[in-house]
């Protein structure tokens, strides 16, 4: 029992020191990559939006569209950016939470509010509370996004979009 307690204590300490060591030097690069996504939405640039995805990345948006790989993700975003009602409004990032899995894999949870988005008929959707869950993987060239899931938390009584 004593050995189990010692192991748990040592494991907990190693996780904390790893997290503290990793985030300061790598979080800046990940935030810059997320900021490229945000900028791409402002200027409707599908190439910039898909820039950091790996060739085998998985992507699922808040409407359930699923794509695999940078090329398919880029193609979907090009179609989305051409829809005026979807592109109406602005997104505001509220926070990022980092969850290191190991030295080469980090999950980043990003809370975003989308304000002023419209339906196809031009009616405005109430503010959307979305969460972006991205998995970043470190390779020889730095970080890349290998998975991105967007969830949309909304009132079940709200208008569907």
Image (cartoon, rainbow, N blue to C red):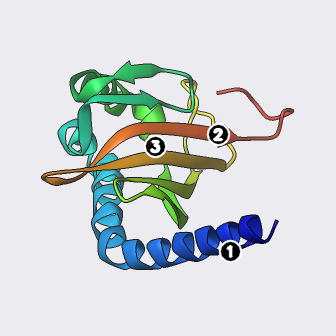
Answer with the quarter of the image where residue 44 lies.
top left
How far apart, in angstroms, are the residues tagged by discs 2 and 3? 17 Å
Crowding at dot 1, Cα within 10 Å, few <14 / some 14-19 / many 20+, comes out as few
- Mark 3 residue element: loop
Q: As drawn, which residue projects farthest toward the left?
A: 141
Quarter of the image where the C terminus is located: top right
Q: Earlier in the sequence, mark 2 or mark 3?
A: 3
Task: Please state the total of marks drawn on the protein image.
Answer: 3
- Mark 2 residue element: strand
Give percent across and percent down for residue 129: 65, 50
Mark toward the viewer: 2 or 3: 2
Answer with the quarter of the image where residue 59 lies.
top left
Give percent across and percent down for residue 84: 40, 33
Residue shown at 20% from the left, 45% from the top: 48
Crowding at dot 2, Cα within 10 Å, few <14 / some 14-19 / many 20+, comes out as some
Question: Is 111 placed left or right of 148 in the picture?
Answer: right
Mark toward the viewer: 3 or 1: 1
Q: Earlier in the sequence, mark 2 or mark 1?
A: 1
Asked if residue 117 can be seen in this view, the reply is yes
Could you say which disc has been placed on residue 68 in the image? none
Asked if residue 124 can be seen in this view, the reply is no
Residue at image mark 2: 152
Residue shown at 51% from the left, 37% from the top: 149
Q: Are marks 3 and 1 in contact (CB under 8 Å)?
A: no
Residue at image mark 3: 88
Q: Relative to residue 136, is residue 155 depicted above or below?
A: above
How far apart, in angstroms, are the residues tagged by discs 3 and 1? 51 Å
Q: Earlier in the sequence, mark 3 or mark 1?
A: 1
Residue at image mark 1: 9
């Amino acid at each position: 029992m004593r050995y189990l307690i010692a192991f748990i204590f040592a494991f907990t300490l190693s996780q904390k020191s790893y997290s503290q060591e990793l985030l300061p030097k790598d979080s800046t690069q990940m935030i810059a990559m997320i900021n490229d996504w945000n900028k791409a939405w402002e200027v409707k640039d599908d190439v910039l939006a898909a820039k950091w995805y790996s060739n085998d990345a998985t992507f699922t948006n808040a409407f359930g569209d699923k794509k695999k790989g940078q090329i398919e993700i880029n193609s979907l975003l090009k179609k989305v950016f051409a829809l005026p009602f979807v592109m109406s409004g602005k997104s505001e990032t509220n926070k990022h939470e980092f969850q290191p899995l190991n030295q080469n894999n980090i999950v980043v949870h990003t809370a975003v509010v989308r304000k002023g988005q419209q339906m196809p008929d031009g009616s405005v959707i109430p503010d959307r509370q979305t969460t972006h869950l991205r998995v970043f993987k470190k390779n020889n060239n730095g970080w890349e996004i290998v998975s991105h899931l967007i969830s949309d938390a909304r009132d079940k009584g709200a208008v569907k979009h």
